[in-house]
Image: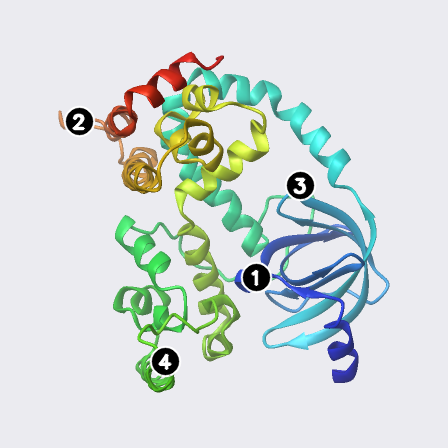
Amino acid sequence: MKRGYERRNFFRAAVPGGGHAATLQWDKTRAGLRVVEESAGGFSAISVGVLEIERGTVAKLRCGERFAEVRVTHVQRHGTGQRLGLELIRDLTAEDMTTRRNSSKSTWLMVGMAATAMIAAMPMFLRDRDRAAILAIVPFMGSEQPWRPKLPPLVLKKETRQTIREHTGLDLLVQPEIARLLGLSDLQRAEFQELVTEQNARLNKNGKTSANELSVPIAESPATQLLTPEQQWRLMEMVGQSVSPLKLIERTAQRTWPRANARQLFDRLGAAALALPSAAKELHLRPEQREQIAAIVELALDTSEDLFQQAASPRGGATDGSSDPATDANAVLEQARQDVLAVLSSDQAHLLESMPR
């Protein structure tokens, strides 16, 4: 078994960043996976839990924009989950993209008519969808769902999401707020602290100063085996909620308006449009301008997401004469729109204004 795995490594390339979230559907079951290797002939993926699936099963795999029909070639235990070998039968990406684009036209037309409100809601909506992909809890009518723990709903604060973005490796598990949210025991906290200390000692010996510099993403770290299945689930949920809102919007722009110019994106997405690579290229933004715009947009999206979540909560509406959170979110985004325009030079502003709408 080991020799076969090593032989596959010669023609399979490891997916960077610890793998991509994916879903696998067969019969009436849908399960969450993490694709860790990919080649022209297939994939290697790791499941969150133990799946009732056999060799030879034909299934549909969705990983980001890619959609394919695959056959299970091997199933091997991997930690609390399984490692699956998936042979590519047929790539369905092109026809799937056409179907999704046609079905979404009317929806996105309505979204474009209310761009400011959309941006306020978008990070939370997209984050929920991506979290569902990671955790295999995408609603599927009439389907059986794999095991999932009964945990209370999780809504992370802005500060917590920022902590998770900054600490992507093993040291995430020793952050006090993260340990609290995961419900780590005193023994677990001590074990993780010992592992981080040992890691830092090795890095310092090699002349490194950052504990994250050589560490793998937390989702790929063997240290997660010290967590209970419920804690592993919650950790993946927290990582999913902490994806940068700007990255979520960039994915949406690429998927929905792949040919839109900077002006068209600005009309639809507001300030976030000017932080997109395509807009920066069209407007010839300098590196310092891109950094300044990204900082403005990240802060505005994080703040508006918190306000929108507050407005969407059962007690979110303004009932005591105070300002309405949804109104405040719109005001934050409108101010960000003005702030990013102020970063542009007069020539860049004229170029943006002169583009077709």
Percent coordinates x, y for residue 314 in the rendering = 31, 36
Point 55% across, 56% down: residue = 135
**Which mark sits nearer the N-terminus, 1 or 4?**
1
* Residue corresponding to mark 2: 323
Residue 48 percent coordinates (x, y): 59, 65
Q: Earlier in the sequence, mark 4 or mark 2?
A: 4
Amino acid carrying mark 1 in the image: Pro
Q: Are marks 1 and 3 in contact (CB under 8 Å)?
A: no
- Quadrant of the image containing the N terminus: bottom right
Q: CA distance from mark 1 to mark 4?
A: 24 Å
**Front of the two marks 1 and 3:** 1
Label 3 vs label 2, nearer the camera: 2
Q: Are marks 1 and 2 in contact (CB under 8 Å)?
A: no
Camera-near label (1 vs 2) is 1
Q: How packed is label 1: few (under 14 Cα within 10 Å), some, or many (20 or more)?
A: few
> Could you tell me how far apart the alpha carbons at marks 3 and 2 are, in whole angstroms?
39 Å
* Sooner in the amino-acid sequence: mark 1 or mark 2: 1
- Nearer mark to the viewer, of 1 and 4: 1
- Between label 4 and label 2, give the one nearer the viewer: 4
The residue that label 1 is drawn on is 16
Q: Amino acid at mark 4?
A: Phe
Residue at 58% across, 25% down: 259
| Mark 4 secondary-structure assignment | helix
Q: Classify 10 Å Cα crowding around label 2: few (below 14), some (14-19), many (20 and above).
A: few
First in residue order: circle 4 vs circle 3: 3
Residue receiving disc 3: 141
Real-space Cα separation, disc 1 to disc 3, in angstroms: 33 Å
Closer to us: 91 or 326: 91
Q: Earlier in the sequence, mark 3 or mark 2?
A: 3
Indicate which disc, 1 or 3, sits on the residue closer to the N terminus. 1
The residue that mark 4 highlights is: 192
Instruction: State if disc 3 and disc 4 touch (CB < 8 Å).
Output: no
